[in-house]
Every structure is written in C-alpha cells, then in structure tokens.
Amino acid sequence: MDDRLVNLRKVLSVPRSLAFYLTFYVGSVVFVCGAVLFMSISKPLFRMFVRGWSGWHRLCCRWLLGIRVKLENPVFKPGVLYAIRHEAFFEAIDLPWLFRLPVVFAKAELLAIPGWGLAGRNFGLIGVEREAGAKALRTMLNEAKRLMAEDRPLIIFPEGTRTPHGTPGKLQSGFAGIYKLLRLPVIPVAVDSGPLYHRTWKQSGTIRYRFAQEIPAGLPREEIEARVEAAINALNG
C-alpha cells in the first residue's frame, strides 16, 4: 500500500474513533435503558433492544470506522456449541446481531455491570466463575440446557479472555469439561478483529469470521482441544 495512503488512514483513525466512541456509547445508554425498561414488560421488545444495541454497534463500525464484516462458510443452527476466537470486544458485542438469540458463556464479572449486566443475564448470558465448584458448574450447565431448549445457539470463547492477534490461542481447561458434559458438536469460528478494533485509534478494513466444519460430540479431550485450537487460529497469521 502507498505510504501516503497508510499515513492518511492513520490520521483519519483519530477523528473516526472519537466519533465512534461518542456515538456508540451515547446510543448504548438508550438501548440499555430500553432493554431494562421492557425486561419485565415485554420479552419481544426487550430482545429487540438487545439485538438493536448489537446492530447499532455494527452500524457505527461500518459508517464511522469504515469496518466491514465478512462471513466465510457461515453455518447458523441450534443444538451446537460455537467456539469463537476472542481478540477484541468487537465479537462479544456483535454476537446478538450475528446469531439469533445466542446463549453466551461470559465472565461472571460482566454480569455485575449496572443495568447492562441485568439485561445480559435476562437475555441469556451465563456467568462463568473459573474457581466455581461442582455445584455451581451443574447450575450453569442446567441453565444452558434450559435456554438451548428454545432452539438457541450456545456460544463460548474457549480461550477465556482476549488473546492478541498473532498469538496462538490456548484453550482454558473448562472448555473440554463443558464440551463433555453438554454432549454437543462444536463449530469453531476464527475471527481477526484484533488488528483493526483492539486499539485506541481503530482502523478501517475488513473483519472476517471463518466458520470451520462441525466437530462431533464425544471426542477425547486431547483431540477436541487440538481441533478447536487449529480452527480458531486459522485467521491468526
């Protein structure tokens, strides 16, 4: 790419990012307040506000940051566990727009955020405490099964936290346990959001989701971990 074009993109990233922060977060207040308001009044309207917040984020990324989203071999179906690479907050915010009513395993601390955490819990976020005992794990998995009975996809970030782009992601030990106990096939999903989004001054470009082939349930721990790691790191070059 021409050096002048590279420099221009760097310069433009500052006002673009400032506009994004202001527009997205002010709009987020409206969507979160709407979700909390309708939480106990109307489930369809509550879910509309949650999905609308995610769609608002996608819209702000496209028109303020110049970020496009590309899906490679997308597969959307209930009754599977989607294991998604985690490089930035982008994919976490994008989930309710990308999937239909996803049930998401998320860090328990996120559910403590005022307003947002309450809305997230009611929408289908399942808090994961890494040091939780067997009773807490059973409660968590029972909740996942209850929500999946509504034909909702189940989502997990198996690395447990954001992993820098260019660094091979390693799975947390809890992933194999959840895979075994839920007895579900897995669809790994690679994403390369880090270089564009996980930075103060965000860059324009294309973020890709690459859906791998479905992996059957019931595999040994070593095999499922190796296959998922290889698949979610497919865009990590």
Image (cartoon, grey):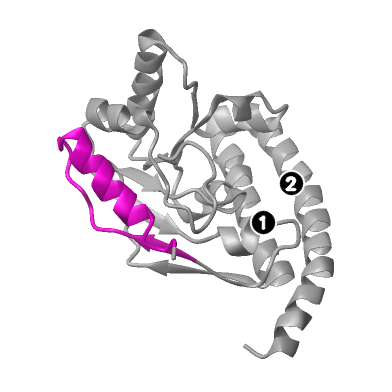
Residue toward you, 221 or 49: 221
Q: Is residue 100 above or below residue 166?
A: above
Whether residue 41 is visible to the viewer of this picture, yes or no, is no
Q: Quadrant of the N terminus?
A: bottom right
Picture residue at 77% right of the left edge, 70% below the top:
13
Q: Which residue is mark 2?
A: 28
SS assignment at label 1: helix
Whether residue 90 is visible to the viewer of this picture, yes or no, is yes
Residue 193 quadrant: bottom right
Is residue 217 found inside the magenta-colored segment of the image?
Answer: yes
Is residue 152 found inside the magenta-colored segment of the image?
Answer: no
Q: Is residue 158 left or right of residue 79?
A: right
- The crowd level at tag 1 (other Cα within 10 Å; few <14, some 14-19, many 20+) is many
What x and y, as percent, mark residue 112?
66, 23
Picture residue at 21% right of the left edge, 38% below the top:
222
Q: Quadrant of the C terminus?
A: bottom left
**Amino acid at circle 1:** Trp
Q: Is residue 124 above or below residue 206?
A: above
Picture residue at 82% right of the left edge, 67% below the top:
14
What x and y, as percent, mark residue 133?
40, 10
Where are the magenta residues, as a range? Answer: 208-236
What x and y, as percent, mark residue 83?
37, 45
What x and y, as percent, mark residue 100?
44, 49
Comes first in the chain, label 1 or label 2: 2
Q: Which residue is mark 1?
A: 56
Residue toward you, 192 or 53: 192
